[in-house]
Image: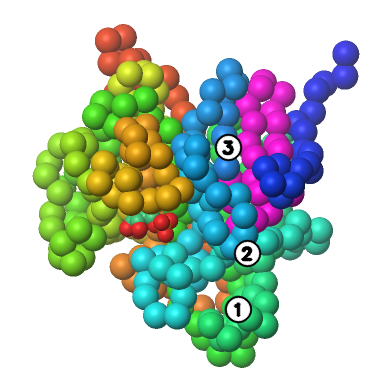
Amino acid sequence: MAEEKPLVEISKGLNGLEKIVLRQVRGSSTEVYLHGGHVTSWKNDHGEELLFLSSKAIFKPPKPIRGGIPICFPQFGGHGNLDQHGFARNRVWSIDTDPPPFPTASANKAFVDLILKPSEEDLKIWPHSFEFRLRITLGPGGDLMLTSRIRNTDTKPFSFTFAYHTYFSVSDISEVRVEGLETLDYLDNLKEKERFTEQGDAITFESEVDKIYLSTPTKIAILDHEKKRTFVLRKDGLPDAVVWNPWEKKAKSMVDFGDDEYKHMLCVEAAAVEKAITLKSGEEWKGRLELSAVPSSYRSGQLDPQRVLQG
Ligand code: TA6
């Protein structure tokens, strides 16, 4: 029987919006909408959904989709005439038919290349020409990789901040721990971005959290005790990590978020926030995010988060 190949298919998603589905031979899959270049689903080999998507998410441009992996560019958490997380997640991207050569393409990976360039309207609110190429890749083992390449195609330099605003699906936020951010400094968005130092052990959750951890390691682990599952987040070119759960009060204030949904999600976002990235004319920046979900069972000692982080 011919070796089954990964599959890439273009179809119509919610509200007739165009989406691309990547399927791997062993059963994992991911979905990305051209609206926002937005990954909205990532399922493991058993078809279990690993990303959180609000039941109230609005799939209607230009409103960003609540959940999945919103792309925050050209700013994260900013002010002024741009939306707080920029406009990339509110724009319709295109499939890039002639991307520059990419070193990692290989037969057993399913991937799609998307591209975003500023419209005349965009240039009025952010007067910088750029080409933003986004490759979404699903590896044979179900790992999900997002690679952003942002090139300054203008004649003058520009600076930007960036985040992959990833919403992880968790069984119960009160049973989740984050490893890898201990002892680091962070800016607390709930306290006017005042700088603090994290305590020495895993981060747990019992109220609203909105923290920008600075100079973070390449690997961060998110442990879902009930599901015996650990998400491993690996990043390159993204020194910071934002950790966010809106908790009850803020959840109720968001129209595109269910009142109780805060119990089943956690955002851990690979980001470049504290120090903006500056590109000279013709320069390109690359920011990579790799997500995997591994079984984690302390009882059997199979997975020690420290080993995952050092491995
Ligand atoms: O990533 C955390 C954060 O900056 C929070 O402050 C909260 O605003 C969240 O992003 C959601 O922002 P959004 O614009 O997607 O509603």
Residue ID for mark 1: 122
Secondary structure category for the residue under label 3: strand
Residue drawn at 46 percent across, 75 percent down: 82
49 displayed left or right of 102? left
Q: Are marks 1 and 2 in contact (CB under 8 Å)?
A: yes
Q: Residue at x 87, y 19 (%)?
A: 2
Marks 1,3: beta carbons within 8 A = no
Q: Residues within 10 Å of mark 1 (few under 14, many from 20)?
A: some
Residue type (three-letter) at the residue carrying disc 3: Ser
Secondary structure category for the residue under label 1 = helix
Q: Residue at x 39, y 23 (%)?
A: 229
Quarter residue 258 falls in: top left
Q: Earlier in the sequence, mark 2 or mark 3?
A: 3
What segment carries the magenta color?
A: 18-39
168 is higher (above) or lower (below) than 154 = above
Q: Which mark is residue 91?
A: 2
Amino acid carrying mark 2 in the image = Arg
Residue 91: x and y, percent?
A: 62, 64
Tell me the residue that label 3 is attached to. 41
Say which residue appears at 25% left-offset and 54% top-offset: 211
Quadrant that contains the N terminus: top right
Q: Is residue 218 magenta?
A: no
